[in-house]
Amino acid sequence: MPHLLDVAGMSRWIQRDGAENILTGMVHYLEDDLRRWQSFEKIPRIASHTRFGVIELMPITDSSLYSFKYVNGHPLNPARGLQTVTAFGMLADVDNGYPVFFSEMTLLTALRTAAQSALAARELARSDARVHALIGAGSQAEFQALAARAVLGLEELQVFDVDAAAVEKVRRNLEPLGFRVLLAESADEAVEGADMVTTCTADKARNAALHRDQVRPGMHLNAIGGDCPGKTELDPRILEHARVIVEFEPQTRNDGEIQQLPPDFEVTELWQVVSGEAAGRTSDEEITVFDSVGFALSDFSALRYAQDASAGSELLGWIDMIADPDDPKDLFSLVTSPAPAG
């Protein structure tokens, strides 16, 4: 019977180990898996788009484990008292096809997205980066700030959102953790003097949360909100004058910021930078962009890390999802048994 890490277990794990410790550990798992990129069977995610949002399946496998994540993105949900993103996922044994680990992935996706951003920034941001600007103060904001501090030591935040209450929420959550938080009244104010900018907006539209004239030489941008066709955050002129790093090019061409550019626009995949096959930042003046749409490999890494970190602990439960008759050829016995199955 596979283990289950549910919402309560996930929350207790984060409280037990600390978010920044978990983010640091997750970066190591991501890095290890990126270094063996060629061993994975990869496809773009499978998406179902409606006027309400998107529902996606994100599968990936190596020779030992298979993973998938179910995830939605519904930008209007908060107005209905619902999360914009919800997710769950699992690991299965490739040898026999049996699931071995199920997990909630709403919190886990927030952690892995932030860890991936921090890993990219470690390779691409200037080594003297000190100030982190957040454009968008929704559910992902605090996780991005924590990951950037854990990996790059960035404690000075400048935050803007069109929703002033969301910006105040970020201040309320992060100042007690030691961050210095400037509540910016505009994107211009937020990016003034920033070394790294993270855009994490949710609107499903062709937007420009950041314009070319707001980006100065040497900046690094983590663009994480544009993640499906017709949903972007950056003025395309920023991309035209930047070094652009992506997760999985076939998926990012369709879903990322570079959907705004010609199909021959040159990009580099993150695994190439992490493994040393391609350079990271090449000068202090270079503008770098991590065009992050979320790829299944990072879910695979996050699930592996969560499984290992929770193994043998009270955080885990069991989930009875596999029909397992005594005779594997007699499935019907489970509906004729005098006792309830399981």
Image: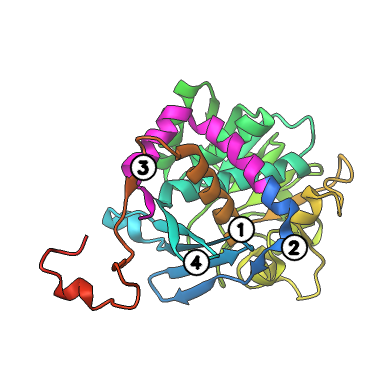
Q: How many marks?
A: 4
Q: Earlier in the sequence, mark 3 or mark 1?
A: 1
Residue 59 horizontal/vertical position (percent): 54, 67
Percent position (x, y) of residue 91? 49, 58
> Distance of mark 2 from mark 1, alpha carbons?
12 Å
**What's the magenta region?**
1-30
Disc 4: which residue? 96
Name which of mark 2 and mark 4 comes first in the sequence. 2
What residue is at 36 percent from the left and 61 percent from the top?
A: 76
In the rendered view, would you say 108 is above or below 208? above
Q: What amino acid is at disc 4?
A: Asn
Separation of marks 2 and 3 at Cα, in angstroms: 32 Å
> Is label 3 or label 4 in front?
4
Task: Reply yes or no: does residue 330 show up in magenta.
Answer: no
Alpha-carbon span between mark 4 and mark 1? 21 Å
Cα separation, mark 2 vs mark 4, equals 23 Å
Secondary structure beneath dot 2 equals helix
| Residue occupied by mark 1 | 297
Q: Amino acid at mark 2?
A: Gln
Task: Give the secondary structure at mark 3.
Answer: loop
